[in-house]
Image (cartoon, rainbow, N blue to C red):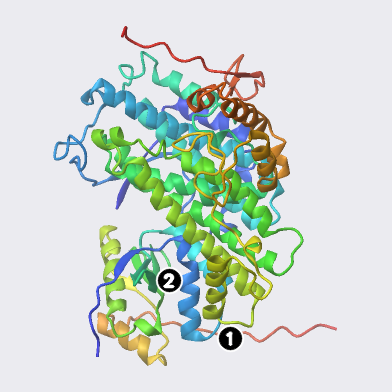
Amino acid sequence: MSVQAQAKLRPLDELDIGAIVKIDERITGIYKPEIWEQRVAYYLRRDPESSQVAEMDGHVVGFMLGDVRGGEFGIEETSGWIERFGIDPDYRGRDLGRQLYGAMLKTFRARGVSAVRTLVDESDAGVAGFLGALGFKPSPLRALVMPLAEPRESR
Amino acid sequence: MRVDNTTLDKRYHDAVEHWRRHWMPDYDSLLENWDKYFPKDDEFCLCAKMELGTSDTVSIGEHTGEKKRLTPSELTEEEARHLLAIIRAQASTEFGSIQQHAGTLARAQDDEDRYWVLRVMAEELRHGYQMFHLLLSQDWSKASGGMKGEDMVEEVLSMGTGSHVLDAFNLDYDSFLDNICFAALIDRVGKYQLTMQKVCAYKPMADSMPPMLREEAFHLAAGVIPLRRWAKRAAQGDPFVSMQAIQKSFNKWFPRALEMFGDERGGDTNVKFGFKDMKNREAQDLYVEEVRRMVRDINLRFLRARFPERSIDAVEGILDRVERDGGRIDGVGPEDLLRLPDPRFFRRKGEPAWTMIGTEGETFTDADTYLRYLATQLADGYMASRDMKLYGDGLRKVASGEWSAQDATRRMPKLRRVGGTCPCSRSVRWVVDEPAAPSRPA
């Protein structure tokens, strides 16, 4: 059951890295500070207002990262992209994901964005279900991948 | 969010470019490597960016509810003079920081760190350019005592490290550590000032703030992220960086950062005129708490690297205990971690100016004992600087009663360029400003 709890929402800043690393570690079990330092630097230098964090009890307990861009994959229209998000497991079920999305949507709209896009791993039912509940629908644009074998060592 | 980009008249644009060639010799390299270090980002634009669609109504002070002012002539003479001083100081800081960064930029151990700082420098150049746009796009002669916009621009471009408006911009960097700590501590004050000025009753100033703030977000990251990485390296025993060296740089910049807010007891005029939405002490207190968060964040990065097998909760517990009890826990003590200096430490302006307070709040009564103590808290290169010599001379006079604290603050010499404003002219001398004569008979 989802219980609405009002979080303090604000744009991401550089002091949120530690909290994001912690939330990610609690979700995945892997400590990856270097990755998050790079990602946060990326969003802060490109679009510091779009990405959002949620605070409760004086701590960052959720984050949603993304930016506004266009001209990729043949999509010329400027779109809002949601790329990473996470909610501290202790704070799930409080509608924080929806609140974070709402805050991002507000900044996207202020910038004239007409569509929000994301990619989802279909095998991750939780994330796919969350995005579906927000109103995301399958796009004709499909994600494709071709794994490359390691090059053989030449003799 | 819509932004209008404008450029200065060619002769002013060229003057900024000329200045840039002197102080940013790596600028071309930044542009050439932009896509490597900042893929997908918009190209750098040396232009003034004005946010469109902002509020037309004054939201604070004695003009609340009135229409924002669009020209200096709509301000009272006192308001215009006050705002002009803010714009001039802001412009000075932007160009000043570039000069400081330039001195040690090439000493960065890591190319990414260097290019991040280079981008910061380029964006500070744009911020200075933005302030020039404010100075040049309107007639400020009533507020400037007849000084023309072009003269004000020339004055700012002629400033060097030692002659800028604010003390934080008159200190040379001792190493690349200072580039990073400056971004983390001094740029953070910049963020506060820009945020406070978003409400400014002078609309062109308010409209200048949002684009500058967006860029400032990365400047803070360009300080904090390398600090996090260095904390990790220090924890792993890397001999090229230590928490003690970072601490000494913090001790150098934190007091100057606090002074950038202005005297703790002031700031009422800014609020009254509707130029800022916080008084000095209120903003400074928020800043101190934010720096405290930063210090904790960096310390946690250090401890996770020191104890890689332990959970974040365990490491947070260690930090809490060390902070609370001050003892050593599993071989880690307070001296191994970063500490926020007491806000009264090593101050020369504001409420605690020229008092002798240690980083932990301890008090000293003898000037030479305090100076010897400072030698243990600051980097050797900084202790050997002219700034410290002048500070020491002033402190001894205050301690002996020869000078009041106000005298000492006023009499700190400044470096002035003479014989031309082009940076090619290296003719400079230290001068002490005489107290200004009152503008009107008493």
Query: Badge 1 sits on which subunit?
Result: A
Q: Residue at x 44, y 37 (%)?
A: B351
Q: Which residue is mark 1?
A: A147
- Subunit that carries the residue with mark 2: A
Quadrant the C terminus of chain B occupies: top left
* Sequence-first tag of 1 and 2: 2
- State the residue at coordinates (30%, 16%): B142
Q: Quadrant of residue B194?
A: top left
Name the element at disc 2: loop
Residue type highlighted by circle 1: Pro
Task: Name the spot of residue B263 as percent of width and height, x first.
Answer: 41, 36
In the rendering, at what x and y percent does residue B305 appear? 64, 73
Marks 1 and 2 close (CB-CB < 8 Å): no
Instruction: Give the residue furthest to the front.
Output: B365
Local secondary structure at mark 1: loop
- Nearest the viewer among B350 and B93 is B350
Residue B94 in picture, x, y percent from top left: 49, 37
Pick whichever, B240 or B57, lies toward us: B240
Q: CA distance from mark 1 to mark 2?
A: 19 Å
Q: Is residue B254 left or right of residue B436?
A: right
The residue tagged 2 is: A73
